């Protein structure tokens, strides 16, 4: 009986229509409605029987934690109850299996099957199946163990709620299993709030273009917190180049990067291209900087408008990343980073860069921040720095050495979080001397190591513990963002900002578009059948290395199905 239930679902695979996608992604039915639950209360029935050696109490505890993560940010109340091992239609089951529902390819650890009404997008049932193949894919109950159950369940519960995959490095919804996915991120929070909440909120819109104002389809637009340097969320530009997001209410930087894994999105993004530069090379990750040459390498701070729309206008892709001119001229020497002028902030941060040939060499970047002429107001004033690189899928790990004006040295290396994730991105606060300004002259030495070299030197770690999805989503070179501020003991800025007025990038468009890529969104009501050759895996909902054909169901009320699978690193993740 169990197999007949699952086989029935596998026979009714239909790909949902998609319109504008988010880096946190949703699916839409032909009416334009999002696929989601309408009922505010959903119960998951878990069946603890397994060959993995996982006790019923451990399974229940880890599942409860995953549900609590999502319950804290969504209006859908999720609860659990223990089942008797019998799966049933009309019941949301969570169970271990070696059945056909997990036959999506090598490395599949879990799959979420979501049944919905084609006419409205309402989810009517969702089941989560976890591999019970202990021999090949052992599941761990430790956050530091291989294939942690908490990472799997939090990811799959996101699919249960209607979320697709994300290309934001810290997201639980990254398509590949890695450390830290048991804890939801800002990207996940904004994703579920944008899906289920319709209350008025801050809204940011814009358009990604190339030369001649041609729209660029499939650009990942990321919103980076000025205060932390972390990616808050990402959206993906549609076929007209447009993007929008709601719910960001803090000062941000904005970056543009080509979508790396369009196969994990819907078929609307099947033909996304990024070879818009000379010799058909790809455009690169870049930050919105405006068009003034003096702003090169210094990202513009953007402040959302409270309870209204903030239109960023035209944002240009770039064929080079854009770093400060003085920084590049002084590469190998010292870059004097002057972010203050007469005690006021004139820069919020800058972009640094390491080519692949610079990694693993003895050198690095040296940045000088001289605050000896700054009047420190009291004894609890700090220089705050944020160093972000892994957030952007840069394939490296940093060590940082800071020497103050009195030759006091502090070294910073990688950190391992409580959920097993390895990172060298960090926030650093340096106490400024109130009595001896000579101390307030800081030399910051950033030394990169390639990810491959780091793994070679630290064999107990895996790439996925540093950056899940790095094999597919990783950049070819290393960028970093270093932000700076003067703050009080509470972490609040004490300075006045005198920053360039925001303007869009209409006057400095880059890239040459070979053609205007078109979305595969079906704008008619006609249903069509796909052939098996279009998708030999017969999977919907976005997969790595798996194409997604337009499985269009009838326009009358029908039940469709999303398959959302989670895989081990460097294996296919089919959703």
Image (cartoon, rainbow, N blue to C red):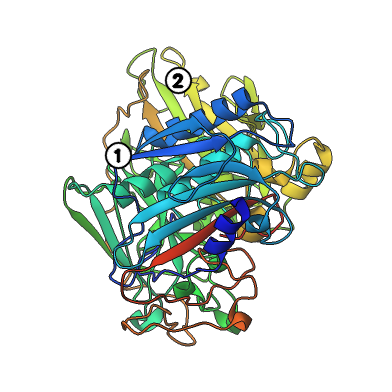
Within 10 angstroms of label 1, few (less than 14), some, or many (20 or more) residues? some
Whole-angstrom CA distance, mark 1 to mark 2, is: 45 Å
Badge 1 element: loop
Q: Which residue is mark 2?
A: 432
Residue 162 can be seen, yes or no: no
Instruction: Give me the residue at 21% from left, 50% from top.
Output: 198
Task: Give the mark nearer the N terminus: 1 vs 2.
Answer: 1
319 over 445 or under it: above or below: below
Q: Percent position (x, y) of residue 469?
A: 63, 53
Front one among 39 and 382: 39
**Does 531 sit left or right of 527 as displayed?**
right
140 over 114 or under it: above or below: above
**Quadrant position of residue 221:** bottom left
Q: Which residue is mark 1?
A: 75
Front one among 153 and 351: 153
**Quadrant position of residue 510:** bottom left
Q: Percent position (x, y) of residue 401?
A: 65, 31
Front one among 519 and 388: 519
Q: Residue furthest bottom?
A: 515
Name the disc covering residue 499, or none. none
Q: Percent position (x, y) of residue 120?
A: 29, 63
Residue 453 can be seen, yes or no: yes
Q: Which marked residue is nearer to the observer: mark 1 or mark 2?
A: 1
Badge 2 element: loop
516 over 395 or under it: above or below: below
Within 10 angstroms of label 2, few (less than 14), some, or many (20 or more) residues? many
Q: Percent position (x, y) of residue 13?
A: 51, 68
**Does 464 sit left or right of 575 as displayed?**
right
Front one among 30 and 269: 30
Instruction: Give me the residue at 64% from left, 22% from top.
Output: 409
């Amino acid at each position: 009986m169990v197999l007949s239930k699952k086989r029935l679902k596998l026979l009714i695979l239909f790909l949902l229509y998609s319109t504008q996608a988010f880096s946190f992604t949703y699916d839409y039915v032909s009416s334009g409605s999002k696929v989601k639950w309408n009922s505010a209360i959903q119960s998951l029935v878990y069946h603890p029987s397994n060959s993995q050696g996982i006790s019923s109490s451990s399974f229940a505890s880890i599942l409860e934690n995953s549900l609590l993560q999502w319950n804290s940010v969504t209006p859908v109340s999720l609860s659990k109850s223990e089942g008797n091992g019998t799966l049933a239609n009309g019941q949301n089951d969570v169970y271990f299996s070696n059945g056909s529902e997990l036959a999506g390819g090598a490395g599949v650890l879990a799959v979420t099957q979501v049944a919905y009404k084609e006419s409205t997008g309402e989810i009517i049932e969702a089941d989560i199946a976890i591999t019970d193949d202990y021999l090949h894919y052992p599941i761990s109950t430790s956050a530091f163990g291989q294939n942690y159950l908490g990472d799997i369940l939090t990811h799959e519960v996101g699919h249960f709620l209607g979320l697709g995959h994300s290309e934001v490095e810290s997201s639980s919804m990254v398509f590949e299993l890695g450390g830290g996915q048991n804890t939801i991120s800002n990207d996940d929070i904004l994703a579920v709030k944008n899906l289920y909440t319709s209350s008025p909120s801050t809204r940011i819109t814009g358009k990604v273009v190339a030369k001649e104002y041609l729209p660029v389809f499939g650009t990942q637009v990321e919103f980076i917190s000025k205060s932390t340097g972390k990616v808050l969320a990402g959206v993906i530009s549609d076929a007209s180049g447009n993007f929008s997001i709601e719910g960001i209410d803090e000062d941000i930087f904005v970056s543009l990067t080509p979508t790396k894994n369009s196969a994990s999105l819907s078929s609307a993004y099947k033909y996304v291209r990024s070879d818009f530069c000379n010799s058909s090379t790809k455009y690169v990750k870049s930050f919105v900087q405006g068009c003034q040459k003096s702003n090169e390498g210094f990202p513009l701070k953007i402040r959302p408008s409270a309870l209204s729309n903030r239109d960023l206008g035209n944002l240009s892709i770039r064929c080079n990343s854009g770093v400060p001119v003085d920084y590049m001229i002084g590469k190998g020497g010292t870059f004097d980073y002057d972010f203050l002028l007469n005690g006021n902030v004139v820069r919020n941060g800058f972009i640094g860069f390491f080519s692949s040939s610079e990694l693993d060499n003895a050198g690095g970047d040296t940045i000088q921040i001289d605050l000896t002429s700054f009047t420190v107001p009291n004894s609890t004033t700090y220089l705050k720095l944020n160093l972000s690189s892994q957030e952007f899928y840069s394939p490296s790990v940093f060590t940082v050495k800071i020497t103050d004006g009195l030759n006091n040295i502090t070294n910073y290396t990688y950190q391992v979080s409580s959920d097993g994730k390895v990172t060298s991105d960090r926030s650093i606060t340096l106490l400024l001397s109130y009595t001896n300004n000579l101390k307030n002259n800081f030399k910051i030495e950033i030394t990169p190591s390639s990810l491959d070299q780091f793994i070679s030197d630290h064999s107990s770690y895996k790439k996925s513990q540093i950056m899940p999805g790095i094999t597919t989503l990783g950049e070819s070179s290393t960028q970093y963002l270093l932000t700076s501020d003067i703050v009080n003991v509470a972490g609040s800025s004490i300075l006045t900002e005198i920053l360039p007025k925001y303007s869009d990038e209409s006057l400095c468009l880059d890239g040459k578009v070979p053609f205007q890529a078109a979305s595969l969104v079906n704008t008619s009501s006609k249903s069509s059948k796909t052939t098996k050759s279009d998708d030999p895996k017969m999977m919907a909902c976005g997969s790595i290395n798996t194409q997604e054909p337009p499985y269009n169901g009838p326009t009358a009320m029908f039940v469709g199905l999303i398959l959302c699978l989670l895989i081990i690193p460097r294996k296919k993740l089919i959703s």
